[in-house]
């Protein structure tokens, strides 16, 4: 299969951030669709700043409103909102419009959700629930939803290219299949473009990234299959890597770039006491398990921190 090329204009139609579009065009061509998606995810979460996120959000029409332009992006937006518009009543559209206005006033940007296949009622319910979030958490959620939209659009755009390439190279693929019959399957190339476990810190008390925080990643290798609640676990954790969060609150590389993670229990620890000496937590540790069926997935485990509270979740 020939490599898939993507120019800046095409990337901008998939995601309205000029930072994203330039980085994707620079990373092009891609050996496969999956490589392009992996690169897009890495660029969006690790190389595009908050201003780039907001620029992408602003490129979307308000949920419940048909886009007025005829660009590729606008037509995609229209298709993505088709179910919502088809299931909405006049009163429902008005309520959605009112809540959109309240959301924008509170958060300063359009309410963003991957709307494909969702009814107006589903979207309105999600909007009301997310309206209760703190702005810094809602920014992160909106960025995740933007990535879902971007991935969907990249698949639409690039799958057609990949299909055309595969049709034009059937003769070559027959040769590959014959060779595999003699030599076995070709070795798999590494598909990850970022470490399989990542994190970042948001200081919700300041409304800014938590920069300069030491981070350790460990894996459980004790005598028991996993650490047990209430039991001493000294000596059971093995360091996988360490780093310090950058100006955007993101960790550096915490472990080697492997395709398949070793299943097991992991722990990410943050030196919060050094970052916030007046706070309640001398350090914070987050323990999570990766199962055999999940070893090819990516695990993003962020920390939302204030002097007297913290929260976490599995991000994308």
Image (cartoon, grey):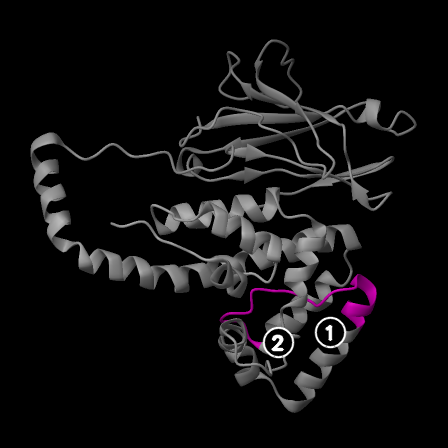
Is 181 placed above or below 238 here? below
Residue 187, by quadrant, is top left
Is 82 placed above or below 177 here? below
In this picture, which residue range is highlighted in magenta? Answer: 102-119
At mark 1, the secondary structure is helix
Number of callouts: 2
Is there a contact, CB below 8 Å, between mark 1 and mark 2?
no
Can you name the residue that lies furthest to the right here?
278
Residue occupying the point 40% across, 63% down: 157
Residue placed under numbered mark 1 in the picture? 100
Measure the alpha-carbon separation of dots 1 and 2. 14 Å
Residue occupying the point 54% across, 38% down: 299
Residue occupying the point 51% across, 70% down: 116
Q: Main secondary structure of the magenta part?
A: loop
Horizontal relation, residue 243 to residue 166: left or right: right
177 or 197: nearer the eye?
177
Residue 10 image offset from top left, x and y in percent: 47, 63
Residue 238 image offset from top left, x and y in percent: 56, 14
217 or 289: nearer the eye?
217
How crowded is the residue under tag 2: few (<14 C-alpha within 10 Å), some, or many (20+)? some
Q: Which mark is residue 121?
A: 2
The answer to whether residue 284 is magenta is: no
Of labels 1 and 2, the one closer to you: 1
Reading the chain from its start, which is encountered first: label 1 or label 2? Answer: 1
Residue 218 image offset from top left, x and y in percent: 59, 21
């Amino acid at each position: 299969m020939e490599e898939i090329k993507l120019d800046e204009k095409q990337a901008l139609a998939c995601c309205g951030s000029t930072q994203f579009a330039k980085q994707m065009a620079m990373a092009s061509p891609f050996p496969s669709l999956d490589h392009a998606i992996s690169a897009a995810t890495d660029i969006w979460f690790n190389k595009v700043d908050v201003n780039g996120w907001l620029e992408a959000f602003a490129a979307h029409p308000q949920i419940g409103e048909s886009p007025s332009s005829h660009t590729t992006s606008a037509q995609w937006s229209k298709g993505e909102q088709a179910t919502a518009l088809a299931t909405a009543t006049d009163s429902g559209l008005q309520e959605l419009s009112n809540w959109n206005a309240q959301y924008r006033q509170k958060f300063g940007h359009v309410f963003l959700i991957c709307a494909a296949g969702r009814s107006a009622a589903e979207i309105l319910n999600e909007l009301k629930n997310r309206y209760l979030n703190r702005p810094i958490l809602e920014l992160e959620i909106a960025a995740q939803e933007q990535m879902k939209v971007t991935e969907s659009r990249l698949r639409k755009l690039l799958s057609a290219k990949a299909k055309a390439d595969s049709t034009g190279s059937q003769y070559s693929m027959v040769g590959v299949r014959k060779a595999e019959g003699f030599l076995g399957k070709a070795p798999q190339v590494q598909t990850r473009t970022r470490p399989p476990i990542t994190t970042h810190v948001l200081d919700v008390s300041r409304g800014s990234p938590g920069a300069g925080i030491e981070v350790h990643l460990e894996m459980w290798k004790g005598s028991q299959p996993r650490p047990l609640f209430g039991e001493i676990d000294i000596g059971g954790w093995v360091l996988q890597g360490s780093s310090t969060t950058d100006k955007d609150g993101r960790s550096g590389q915490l472990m080697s770039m492997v395709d398949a993670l070793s299943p097991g229990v992991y722990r990410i620890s943050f030196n919060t006491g050094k970052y916030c000496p007046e706070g309640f937590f001398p350090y914070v540790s987050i323990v999570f398990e990766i199962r055999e069926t999940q070893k090819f997935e990516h695990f993003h485990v962020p920390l939302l921190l204030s002097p007297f509270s913290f929260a976490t979740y599995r991000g994308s």
